[in-house]
Image: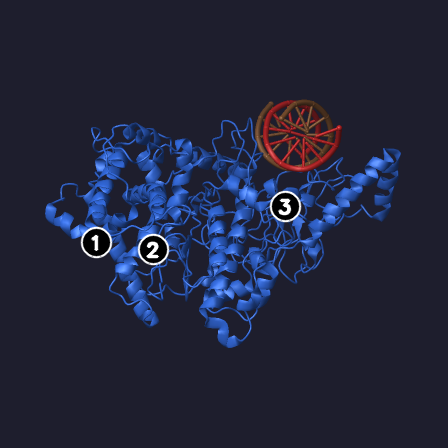
Chain colours: A blue, B brown, C red
Amino acid sequence: MGTPEKTQITPTSLSKFEDSPVFKYIDSLSPIELGKSSQTNNDFNSLACLSPSSLFPSPQINCHRESRFSVERHHLSADSNSRVLQNGNQSNTSEEASKAVEQSDLYNEHLGCLDKDSSFKGISCNIFDEKSDLAIELPRTSNYNCGSPDGNLEPCYKLLKKTSPEVAGQERSPFQRNRDEWQERQRSFESERDLRKIRGIKLSEESAGCGWVAIVSDVADILTVNSANVIHENTDGQDLGMEDSDTTSFISNIPQIPLDNANNLENVESGDLRVSREQNELGEPVTDQTSGILSRCLVDKLVVSDSGLKNDDKMKFNQFSRQQRSIRRRCLVFEKSPGFGLHLTSLPNISKGGQSPPNKSTLSFIKTGKVPCDSGAVVAENSSETPATVGGDDAGHSTPEKKRHFILILCRQKFEFIESASCKRCNCKRSKCLKLYCDCFAAGLYCIEPCSCLDCFNKPIHENVVLETRKQIESRNPQAFAPKVVRSTDGVLDSWGETSNTPASARHKRGCNCKRSSCLKKYCECFQGGVGCSPSCRCEGCKNSFGRKDGCDESEHNEDGLEASEQNASDKNSHDNVIDKKTEEHRELSVPSDISRLPFAYRGKLTGSFQHGSDSSSCMSKFDSNLQAIPENKTPEVPKHKCLPLVPKLNSSPNSKRVSSPHRECASTAAHRSRKLKLKFVPSIRSSSLPSEP
DNA sequence: GAGTTTGAAACT
DNA sequence: CAGTTTCAAACTC
């Protein structure tokens, strides 16, 4: 992105831009009457002066112009769109065109703080008066499309598409399509750039805003999606209307993907589905690495063009997308590839709550672009929507209808999965969220809005502090951030002498030290992790329903029962019943094998809002903010070794709390059952990074 | 929501 | 390494 050329606005260029698709887009946006006002600068300034640091710490400043444009466009769109709707269809009269031009300028004036003397009327100043919420809103809205957050405004890229000489609906080869898409993106990008020229944005002025640069800079990586990376297909070439945009962009951002991964990002194309981070600049699909998609677990960009989607599907889709906006969170975890940069801290409701990570079918679909044969089943299992349009004859794999339907499922699964990971929050009061007490910190996540912590330092703006603290903790205990629940390689006897294929093969690495909870409550890390206690545990009166440690057999259980009977029997029984129920539910849930193979780490407690049947949607409404993960490339270098089977190693000291002699197993096999639990998987690289023990 | 319980983490 | 303190989640009311 080049340096802005702020003095290049000439009548000629204006004329040229008036012919540009973006210009037409703006032209068509609103009949808002132009006016002059001087009141909004303050509004915007107040926005600009919002401290963005907690939201957008990314140093990727060079894209901020793009970000800003997108943000502005959002607001403009939101407002103008409503007016558009009020006024009905608008014509393309020259009068309105001029209005649009003026409006554009006006908008520019307000947002860009360019002309403080300017005044305006007709545009409610509340466009800019979104208080601090806007700061949260920015990344989200910018994530989606050029339109309003409600998705009822036709994205500009679609407009571009419409004005494009390309013949929609024409059959083209994949190569042609790639090329065309790339060109399209180029055009889109250039158009936006041109528009910015028109609007006279000055970089220096932008940068001058209090923290505005920081805001937009962090949004930058998101934005490029809107302008450049949005892939669109309009196979019928028709205007699909503004109210129900047929193109929905899902963007779940885990920014700051390590550079060494940047070129390694997936590009998945499959008909109407695009799951891509970046596309080869030549417009060619990047080498198929879709298998790694789920390893990163997040759809960096999922752009779905569902021109053929049924309206209700679209609505569902849009609604869902709104819920899922911008689950962004930086990860404090440092593993390099193949980790995906985010330690998903939880995987609750994986199956029982209807949430499930993308399954094999989904993967297959991503990879092949074909609706898998079992898609029907997928639909039936995971969606209330009719499976009638999915599955069935094999020939129908490529039918747009089925693909689109499957896309819905895919996205839902994907984001439900992501959502699960995002719903983590802490309530730290004194630790500044810089100790392992803090679940967020321990999980390698920055604290986010829903956290109730005080004096929180676990935020991107304190990145250095966080990293420093983390180093400190790791120096004290290299395993401090390692997964606590481990599972040995399939078929290999684990340290507890069990074959790893048994559900009980997963164990808490360090073991618990429960005294009073009988390992039947989530105080117990073993129980919380959904694993049985092991000889490593120093627990007393273990009743862990996932497996008692040696020595705590049935007789002990009975003893406990007797002991319990001495207490308030009825209360105890009812309580145990509750526990048993929960436990049973707990045990029923299992992480699908696909997930277990993901080369990333789950950490922390995933309980949070998913507990006890918390509604995921409500959860998301609260968490609809910046989910962020710290860049992995900041991780300290860890020697890589071959993946070794777990070597039995018990704590030499039954009382030792800290992990002193780490032993690892292949994370690729790390699978354990859990819902609402601490799920701490180890990325394969890291998991094998420590030397084996004799 | 406030208070209590619990056990991990941190500290000495 | 052991004992103690701190801490925040889990739990109860």
Q: Earlier in the sequence, mark 1 or mark 2?
A: 1
Task: State which chain disc 1 sits on.
Answer: A
Callout 1 amino acid: Ser
Q: Where is A462 relative to A626, above or below?
A: above
The percent coordinates of residue A175 (x first, y second) are 32, 70
Residue tagged 1? A20
Confirm whether circles 1 and 2 share one chain. yes
Q: Where is A78 relative to A182, above or below?
A: above
Task: State which chain disc 3 sits on.
Answer: A
The percent coordinates of residue A484 (x first, y second) are 61, 45
Q: Secondary structure at mark 1?
A: loop
Q: Residues within 10 Å of mark 1 (few under 14, many from 20)?
A: many
Q: CA distance from mark 3 to mark 2?
A: 36 Å
The image quarter in which residue A112 lies: top left
Q: Earlier in the sequence, mark 1 or mark 3?
A: 1
Residue tagged 2? A229
